[in-house]
Structure formats: C-alpha cells, structure tokens
Amino acid sequence: MQKIFPDCRRSDIGPHYIVEALAGFLEPVRPDHPDHGCSACGRVNYTKPVISAIEGMALGGGFELAMNSDIIVCGEGAELGLPEARIVLMPGGGTQNLPRLIGAPPAKELMWTGQRIPAAEAKGYRLCNHVVPKGQAMEKARDIVGQIAKNSQLSVMLVKQAVNRGIDMSLANGVGTEADLFRLLTFSDDREEGLKAFREKRKLNFMGS
C-alpha cells in the first residue's frame, strides 16, 4: 500500500506531493514528545523512507517540507528556494536542514539572496536526487517506492536510523550505532527468511518482523 499526501494549501507551495516508500503509515513522534509538530524534525518523526515529488514551485514552506524527505524527485521546471528574508521572516527549519544538506556557505547565500533554484541546478547542489521530464516526478517517485519495497522493511528502517543518528556523531560513534542496530536484525524472522531464501534460490517473503 502507498499513501499520497496532497499539497499543502499555501500560496508559497506549488504542486507538491509526498509518497510514502513502504507499506503502512510512517510512525510520527508521540504527541507528548518535545519534537512533536516540529517541521524541522521530519527526519526524526518518520521511521520509514519518505519521497517528495515536486512539480512547479516549492518555495519557503514547500521547500522546507521537501527537505524533511529522504529522497526528492523534481520535474523539469520545478523551482526551489527560501525567500523568507525578503519579507522579514526566517526559514522554518531551513536554517538547520539546508546547511546540513549542502554546507553552510552555499546555504547562507541561498537564504540571504532568496533566489529560486531551477531543478537542474538543485541537482548540482545535491538538493534533489533526480530531475525528470515535466509531469513525471510522481511516476519516478513510485518507481523508487517499488524498488525499496522489494527489500526488507526492517533493514530499510534501520539503515535510515543509522544514517540519521550517525550524521551528527563522530565516525567511531556512528559505526557503534550501526553495529547496535545491526544486532537488532539478528533477532528478526526476516533475517532468517532472507538467508533461507538465498540458500534455496527462491523469492523472498518478508513479513516485517
């Protein structure tokens, strides 16, 4: 099952969709958690991959929403940007997410100037994973969904946790976190299924447990 979330109805957000990459709804942070409702904490909120497909403009809140995704697909003609400084505002989460994605100097320039970044240029900045012909961003996102869904949900989930937790750690601590998460897989039924299917040269049948 795939869930598609329609665009946020704000003037600064163009046609923008989020596709969930795996079956079942992504588990958000508990309502009583201090990060609940924080738009800048999207990578923490969801345990499974999130893919954004952008057609048209994703400016301000639209771009900030997209940066909380794991993968971004842009249609040709898409434009990204954080123009808040032009109207005496602050990018909501953008001051933290953008430097982590592309580095502090280019992030500052983009936020200070408020310039719009065409899709091809955004790929050069590594702000999006793919640029496809106009109108085909959702199709590409669904293709990626299908590729991810063939793999173990547990492995995909823990890979995301290892990357997101480790990115702000030292290499030694990050490797330690990876090892701890890997140990969790050794107790899963899916690990046994994966090894058994490999030996028997048959199709995998993961259960997510």
Image: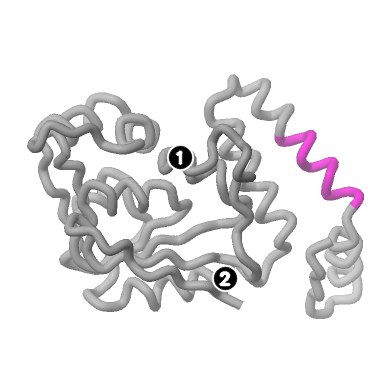
* Placement of 127 over or under 174, stated as above or below: below
Residue 68: x, y in percent? Answer: 43, 47
Q: Looking at the image, do the residues carrying marks 1 and 2 touch, with CB atoms under 8 Å apart?
A: no
Magenta residue check for 193: no
Please report the bounds of the magenta region as a residue range: 178-187
Q: Is residue 188 left or right of residue 154?
A: right
Considering the image in quadrants, where does the N terminus appear? bottom right
Residue 51 lies in quadrant: bottom left
Q: What secondary structure characterizes most of the magenta part?
A: helix
Which numbered dot is residue 38?
Answer: 1
Quadrant in which residue 111 is drawn: top left
Tell me the mark number nearer the camera, choosing from 1 and 2.
1
Q: What residue occupies the far front of the structure in this picture?
A: 32
Question: In the displayed structure, does residue 63 sit left or right of residue 51?
Answer: left
| x then y, percent, for residue 169 | 58, 23
Residue drawn at (32%, 62%), measured in percent from left and top? 8
Q: Amino acid at mark 1?
A: Cys
Marks 1/2: CA distance?
30 Å
Q: Residue at x 19, y 46 (%)?
A: 81
From the image, tell me which residue sits under label 2: 147
